[in-house]
Image (spheres, rainbow, N blue to C red):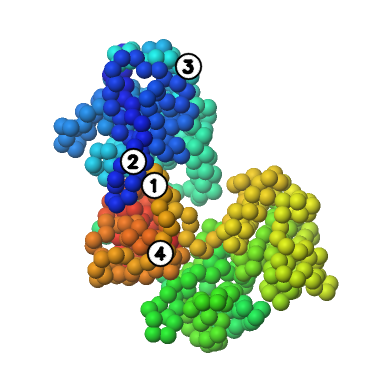
Amino acid sequence: MAMLLSVNVGMPQDVPWQGRTVHTGAWKSPVQGPRMVRRLNIEGDGQGDLAGHGGEMRAVLVYQRESYAYWRRQLGRDDLTVGIFGENFTVDGLPDDEVCIGDRYRIGEAEFEVTQPRVTCYRVGMRLGEPAMASLLVAHHRPGFYLRVLAEGRVRAGDEITLTRRGPEALSVADTDALLYLPGRDPATLRRALNIPALSPGWQQSFRELAAEHAQEPQQAPGGPGAPGGTGGTDVRRDGETAGRAGFQRLRVVRIVHETPSVSSIYLGTPDGTPLPEARAGQYLSLRIAVGAESPTVRSYSLSSAPSSGIYRISVKREPRGRVSGYLNAVLRPGDLVDIASPRGTFVLEAGTRPVVLVSAGIGATPVLAMLHQLAAARDARPVWWIHVAHDRAHHVFAEEVRALLARLPDGHEHIYYTGAADSPPGGPRVSAGRPTARSLAELGLPADADAYLCGPSAFMEEVGGFLRDHGLRPERIRTERFSALPALTPGVAPAPAVRPHQPPGPPGTGPLVTFARSGITTAWSAAHASLLDLAEACDVPTRWSCRTGVCHTCVTPLVSGGITYTTPPLELPDAGSVLVCCSEPVGEVVLDL
């Protein structure tokens, strides 16, 4: 018979960590006597980061005495006191390889249901002083699990734990954890997991996405990418070093077209006429440019032409104080050579039959213009809406080109907004003054089942995206593209004033150059940094992470060029051309899309 050995609670507190402050409820201590368990937590308990912990589906965290004994041996530790793994219930029995998602248990007066394995989180490593602990819990198949409270009541140490119902599909906690975080996933097991109503919504969504990816992948031979021990599609060099896709290649400027007073289109081809790497509509190119005597700078620009044209076209707006954009608009000439990385990016036009809404502001028209080229070339039967915001006619980029493309579509629609003088061009579409509003977009008759693609300033995309959601478009069908750094994701870390990215403090590094392309920072690597993530944080480059040990893939970043080595081998390698910055360092000059 399983037994509840200890009830552990703790309210969130601020804990210093690596020069920052983390608000966390990971510090739990045993309590004596009965404690009331309610829908969201135990009396006297709380969670610091409700995005990853707590809530109805993660009200109570369970860990086993047997796992404590295992880690004492594995880590050589004799100080692992109950509650140190952040669990609310320390139990005798209920091993992760036997407990199943959906199992129900009675403990004392309360009844519970198993909903998911523990979230892989860096804070368990903080609590134990073992930074790799989140990875170890998954790799050793000992994550622990969360309970949902079905019936509230009092519990106390010494209560027996009684199984009242076995969950459907008999999928254990350990197998469920491995299904999300480890390679070699079985599509049939993914489908089984989705048949378990008790599985928490977040894990269900992750498994739906994984199942969709498997449905699109070709069959792999045993031992191929994605299989246990395989490379997941990433080129692995000796000592764990990995390489991204081909880095920069030299292309020739074929011609330059001045579209407006501030925008020029640059056409690029190979010097010897060989085919260019294939691109998808919506992807971008990264250019490495040396302006004057300065060190080369990397900038990214969307392709603005049809992806099958045989020539790349980018269209660059000259910014008032933009060194690179000024160089490309005023100095670059046909015949010049430019270093270009292969097309990349996930903001791409998807195949399908649903209507398409292309929304842009200013130079944000470039990626959606490439999508419009693809739709027009195929004379796609889908209804297509082109919605664009410009300042006035003089700054309305690609106006005639868009009109010609829409004319080739069976069901094309265009609406233009001018924030300055709203003078409609002769023979052109109706122009509205100002910016799109919820009402004006609703009046266009946009179908609620459309796929929408938005590009422009962040505030514009957030506002228009909200209008479209209110109009009935599903959030997952509203895709956005941004070239500034993505918003930081640093769970539990106390907010701090935003700081512009800068060179890291301390003595300059002597290692290979590392470029954070979105942030415009190039700096030399130093062994003083534990990882590329650590270097990015030292530069105040916005970063996104959770486990910091190569498990969750929150930190996955496109590798524009160069090679890296993993200091801690990730449990599953990312896709080719990507890198987990939380556990890697450069083995040569590196350019990251960060």
| Marks 2 and 1 in Cβ contact (< 8 Å) | yes
Q: Which mark is residue 14?
A: 2
Q: Which residue is mark 3?
A: 151
Q: Amino acid at mark 2?
A: Asp
1 vs 3, front mark: 1
Mark 1 residue type:
Ala
Inspect the image, locate mark 3, and give the three-letter code of the amino acid beneath it: Ala
> Residue 131 occupies which quadrant of the picture?
top left
Residue 477, position in %: x, y? 62, 49
**C-alpha gap between disc 4 and disc 2:** 26 Å
Between discs 4 and 2, the one toward the N terminus? 2
Q: Where residue 494 is drawn, which disc sits there?
A: 1
In this picture, is 142 found above or below 309? above
In the displayed structure, would residue 585 be above or below residue 176? below
Q: Nearer the viewer, residue 451 or 440?
A: 440
Question: Between marks 3 and 2, how big is the CA–CA gap?
Answer: 32 Å
